[in-house]
Image (cartoon, rainbow, N blue to C red):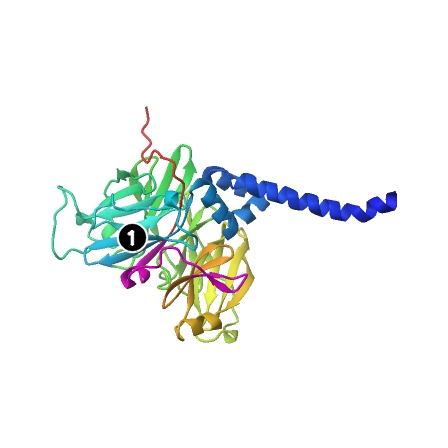
């Protein structure tokens, strides 16, 4: 009797574990984004599955949650936008941008469904046929939630005519809603500063920074991870801004044996399972690194993917990774864009890319995630 129990116990334990994991997967897939984000903090298992493509598909099918990228293309003073994802289009999760004026330009996106955009239209804004989009006198900034078509006008930033990188929008808390918008500026003397909008006080402030090296030209946007915004600098360094204290520090990138790489090494900061990650790529492959120990800035290489087969499909065009859609799905760019499954080594069908060339070759790509719930974009004290 005892011997029989000892033999069957491992199998029973395994079946119990599988059943338990499936049940937790099913429960989490029916939760709101707010609950999912809280669950990722308290449970390593929840954090793991929340970044898997299969979970994102399931969550999208159950609740109509929007996952994907907004492709922005420019046509003179006007812009067009398209939501692109590796999944079939769901009518509930189809974004339309017809509520935006045609000359609106997106500057920042968030993983809580918010966008920051600017427009040239308005009675109090002068019109000029030869404007520059970074001329602050011509711009009106807004924050919006496209899924609910809510929009709120923002105050004028003082230095947006000096922007040298895209803005970034990060939600700090969901109830009550609080978010910050950050833009990196540079003056004529090459001095840098961060202009920060805080929705709690509904105003902008300027944080002067002293950079050891100029920002990298390989990446225009920052990456939000571990409560901080991160920018890639030149000479294998990075800048981190604590979004709560609004203080900044610097960090170093992983030390690479450059003799093992083929050609020039391109680097791109990304988010990997909620942590700060880095994509290092040459002409033949790309590697995914992640900071395992943020306090001590300990980097670990977790994967290496060869791109030779993709290069052949794209007629010898260099194919490079742009962003991580999920922990196992990468947004790639060759002769156009594609999603690549790094576990099964195959391309994934793309919803939204049956489009004209001007849209499949956008000027800017913004990661985006949203629910369908209305929000209070400007919390007004009673």
Front residue of 197/251: it is: 197
Q: Give the range drawn in magenta.
A: 339-366
The residue under the point 44% across, 74% down is 312
Q: Quadrant of residue 320?
A: bottom left
Judge by depth and name the residue closer to the eye, 154 or 149.
149
**Residue at x 15%, y 43% (from the top left corner):** 122
- Which residue is most to the top? 382
Q: Label 1 belongs to which residue?
A: 81
Position of residue 238 in the picture relative to residue 207 (left or right): right
* Residue 68 placement, left or right of 298: left
Is the residue 345 above or below the residue 66 in the image? below
As displayed, is residue 10 above or below residue 151?
below
Q: In which quarter of the image is the N terminus?
A: top right
- Side (left or right) of 236 relative to 198: right
Residue 268 screen position, x and y as percent: 43, 61
The secondary structure type at the circle numbered 1 is: strand
- Residue 194 appears anywhere in the view: no
The answer to whether residue 363 is magenta is: yes
Q: How crowded is mark 1: few (under 14 residues within 10 Å), some or many (20 or more)?
A: many
Which image quadrant is residue 92 in?
A: top left
Name the residue rendered at 75%, 48% in the picture: 11
Which quarter of the image is occupied by the C terminus? top left
Residue 45 lies, in percent from the top left, at 59, 46
């Amino acid at each position: 009797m005892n011997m029989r129990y000892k033999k069957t116990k491992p199998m029973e334990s395994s079946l119990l574990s599988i059943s338990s994991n499936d049940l937790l997967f099913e429960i989490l897939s029916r939760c709101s984004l707010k609950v999912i984000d809280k669950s990722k903090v308290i449970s390593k298992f929840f954090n793991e599955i929340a970044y898997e493509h299969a979970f994102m598909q399931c969550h999208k099918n159950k609740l109509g949650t929007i996952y994907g990228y907004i492709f922005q293309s420019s046509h003179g003073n006007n812009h067009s936008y398209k939501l692109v994802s590796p999944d079939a289009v769901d009518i509930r999760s189809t974004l339309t941008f017809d509520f935006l004026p045609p000359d609106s330009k997106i500057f920042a996106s968030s993983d809580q469904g918010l966008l920051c955009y600017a427009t040239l239209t308005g009675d109090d804004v002068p019109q000029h046929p030869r404007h520059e989009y970074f001329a602050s006198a011509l711009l009106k900034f807004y924050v919006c939630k496209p899924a609910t078509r809510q929009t709120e006008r923002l105050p004028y930033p003082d230095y947006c005519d000096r922007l040298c990188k895209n803005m970034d929008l990060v939600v700090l808390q969901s109830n009550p809603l609080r978010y910050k918008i950050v833009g990196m500026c540079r003056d004529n003397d090459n001095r840098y500063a961060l202009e920060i909008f805080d929705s709690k006080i509904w105003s902008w402030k300027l944080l002067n920074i002293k950079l050891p090296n100029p920002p990298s030209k390989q990446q225009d946007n920052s990456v939000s991870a571990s409560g901080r915004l991160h920018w890639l600098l030149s000479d294998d360094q990075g800048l981190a801004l604590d979004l709560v204290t609004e203080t900044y520090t610097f960090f170093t990138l992983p030390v690479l044996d450059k003799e093992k790489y083929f050609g020039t090494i391109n680097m791109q900061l990304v988010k990997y399972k909620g942590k700060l990650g880095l994509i290092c790529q040459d002409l033949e492959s790309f590697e995914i690194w992640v900071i395992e120990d943020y306090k001590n800035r300990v980097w670990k290489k977790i994967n290496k993917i060869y791109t030779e087969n993709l290069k052949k499909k794209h007629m010898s065009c260099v194919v490079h990774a742009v962003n991580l859609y999920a922990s196992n799905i990468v947004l790639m760019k060759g002769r156009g864009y594609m999603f690549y499954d790094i576990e099964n080594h195959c391309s994934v069908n793309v919803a939204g890319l049956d489009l004209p060339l001007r849209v499949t070759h956008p000027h800017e790509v913004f990661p985006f995630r949203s629910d369908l719930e209305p929000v209070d974009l400007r919390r007004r004290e009673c």
